[in-house]
Amino acid sequence: MKKLLFLSFILCGLLSTAIAQDSTSSREIRLLVRGDDMGFCHAANVGCIESYKFGIMRSVELMVPTPWFMEAVQMLKENPRTSSGIHTPSCL
């Protein structure tokens, strides 16, 4: 599961790079890759951190409260350059 999540982040990055190189526009294209739902499960935590370390992701949203929240917090502490925010429920 975590490999699938990691590969999806990489494929999105490759696709966006190909689109940017194909563009005939003179405008600069910028892309911010953000992970979502960190804390939801162990695979999401690992996928987000690996996508940060080895991929192009630089921002992540952390879900609170979730079963794997404490693990996610520890992983983010170990990777302090990762930009993180709180994922708020849509019912609020």
Image (cartoon, rainbow, N blue to C red):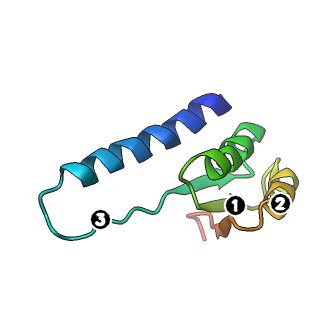
Counting from the top left corner in percent of width and height, residue 10 is at 49, 40
Is the Cβ of the residue at disc 2 closer than 8 Å to that at disc 1? yes
Counting from the top left corner in percent of width and height, residue 19 is at 25, 49
Counting from the top left corner in percent of width and height, residue 36 is at 59, 54
Classify the position of the N terminus by image quarter: top right
Q: Which residue is mark 3?
A: 29
SS of the residue under disc 3:
loop
Q: Which residue is mark 1?
A: 62
Q: Nearer the viewer, residue 70 or 55?
A: 55
Left or right of 33: which side holds 65?
right
Against 10, residue 88 (above or below) is: below
Lower position in the chain sequence, tag 3 or tag 2: 3
SS of the residue under disc 1:
strand
Lower position in the chain sequence, tag 3 or tag 1: 3
Q: Residues within 10 Å of mark 3 (few under 14, many from 20)?
A: few
Q: Nearer the viewer, residue 77 or 54?
A: 54
Disc 3 to disc 2, how far (Cα)? 32 Å
The residue shown at (51%, 43%) is 9
Q: Which residue is mark 2?
A: 73
| Front position among marks 3 and 2 | 3
The residue shown at (84%, 59%) is 78
